[in-house]
Amino acid sequence: MSLTHIGVTTPADLDPCGREHHPDCGIRDVLDRIGDKWSVLVIVELAGGPRRFREIQRAIDGISQRMLTLTVRRLERDGLVLRTVYPTVPAQVDYRLTETGASLTHLIKGLADWSLAHRAVIGEAQRAYDQAHPDNEIR
């Protein structure tokens, strides 16, 4: 380990529940969902209010119909998104954040702000790394 890494984290920082053999306390499942890029983008889109499926799909560049369907179903299952079907012909469906889903928006905004503020530094670090390691396969 390099000297720059000493003291960055402590066992207490990495062990939220304090039990030696159970360090993630079940947070892995939650982080897998909210850390998924499509989930984050859907939550960002729904932070502006209810949206219909096609509105979400048009707003999120590159997401396929299948991936959006899976993403909103997973978010619905997790209690972060509410799917409402209106009794019209044809049926209209919209998606909105639940109270729990809405409580994530300030965290995601913080992450987005951090990303924008550090985008150039990260890009430069990646270029320097790639130049120093031309045969690497990490991209």
Image: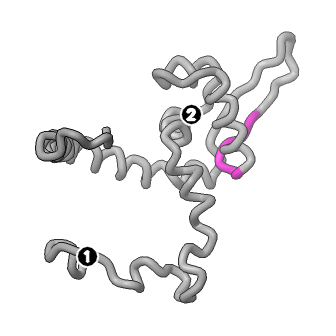
In this rendered view, identify the residue nearer to me: 11 or 86: 11
- Mark 1 and mark 2 lie on one chain; the one further toward the N terminus is 1
Tell me what residue is drawn at x 62 percent, y 17 percent. 54
The spot of residue 108 in percent (x, y) is: 43, 49
Q: Amino acid at mark 1?
A: Val
Answer whether residue 29 is visible to the viewer in this image. yes
- Name the disc covering residue 49, or none: 2
Instruction: From the image, state whether disc 1 or disc 2 is nearer to you.
Output: 1
Mark 2, secondary structure of its residue: loop
Q: Amino acid at mark 2?
A: Gly
- Residue 29, percent from left and from top: 62, 59
Q: Is residue 48 visible?
A: no
User: Which residue is the site of mark 1?
Assistant: 8
Residue 121, given in percent of the width and then of the height, sits at: 15, 46
Magenta-drawn segment: 78-83
Q: Is residue 134 above or below residue 35?
A: above
Quarter occupied by residue 97 = top right
Q: Residue at x 83, y 11 (%)?
A: 90
Describe the element under mark 1 as helix, strand or loop: loop
Question: In the depicted view, which residue is nearer to us: 100 or 112?
Answer: 112
- Is residue 107 rendered to the left or right of residue 67? left
| Label 2 Cα crowd, 10 Å radius (few <14 / some 14-19 / many 20+) | few
In contact (CB < 8 Å): disc 1 and disc 2: no
Residue 82 screen position, x and y as percent: 71, 41
Q: Is residue 105 left or right of residue 78?
A: left
Using the numbered discs, state the Cα–Cα distance from disc 1 to disc 2 in whole angstroms. Answer: 39 Å
Q: Residue at x 77, y 19 (%)?
A: 92
Q: Is 79 included in the stretch rendered in magenta?
A: yes
Q: Quick one: quadrant of the N terminus?
A: bottom left
Magenta-drawn stretch contains 132: no
Q: Quadrant of residue 124?
A: top left
Q: Which quarter of the rendered picture does the C terminus lie within?
A: top left
